[in-house]
Amino acid sequence: MISTNLHAAFNRQINAELWSAYLYLSMSMDAQDKGYPGIAQWFFIQWKEEQQHAEKFARHLTDRMSKVYLEELDGVKQEWSSPMEMFQDASAHERKVTKLIYQLMDLAISDKDYASVSFLQWFVDEQVEEEKSVDDIITILEQIDDNPDAMLSIDHELGKREL
Ligand code: FEO
């Protein structure tokens, strides 16, 4: 059985993952609105990935006979001044999520809940990937320095992302 503390923390993480999904859907819609269909597609896939993360946490709780309690979602930002600002926000957000995952891992270890430790390891590895994919795009955006043709080409490349 999952401890009361860890149970509450897992529930909060479901909310955090769903909020991440909501944030990335907002980025996708803003990118679409501003004429970046490829970036919109990239964040649309990210929206779906975050929903899968929330589902994984929910499944872990139900597999351990612990009820999922869904909390209210806070609102998200709706407008970004540029693709760079969008990806910088995504990078900062993923770093916060990594800290949340590490806190969950600390709690699972202190509870000697090795099933949760094993479950959380996937998220520890996933966060390395999550941070890297966003940071790689920021590096590319820094290199093109707002060149419109290069931006078009990057938008096209990012639009190839699939789930
Ligand atoms: Fe669910 Fe982007 O971390």
Image: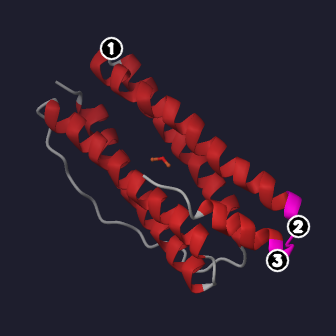
Whether residue 98 is in magenta: the answer is no
Report which quarter residue 81 is drawn in.
bottom right
Residue 116 position within the rendered picture, expressed as x and y whole percent measured from the top left: 31, 24
Q: CA distance from mark 1 to mark 2?
A: 49 Å
Per the image, the residue denoted by label 2 is: 145
Q: Which residues are magenta?
A: 143-149
Q: Is residue 25 above or below residue 60?
A: below
Q: Mark 1: give few (<14), some (14-19) or many (20+) Cα within 10 Å.
A: few
Q: Mark 2: give few (<14), some (14-19) or many (20+) Cα within 10 Å.
A: few
Foreground label between 3 and 1 = 3
Q: Amino acid at mark 2?
A: Asp
Report which quarter residue 67 is drawn in.
top left
Q: Amino acid at mark 3?
A: Pro
Q: Nearer the viewer, residue 159 or 1?
A: 159
Q: Amino acid at mark 1?
A: Lys
Residue 139 position within the rendered picture, expressed as x and y whole percent measured from the top left: 79, 52
Per the image, the residue denoted by label 1 is: 112
Q: CA distance from mark 3 to mark 2?
A: 9 Å
Q: Is residue 24 above or below residue 113?
A: below
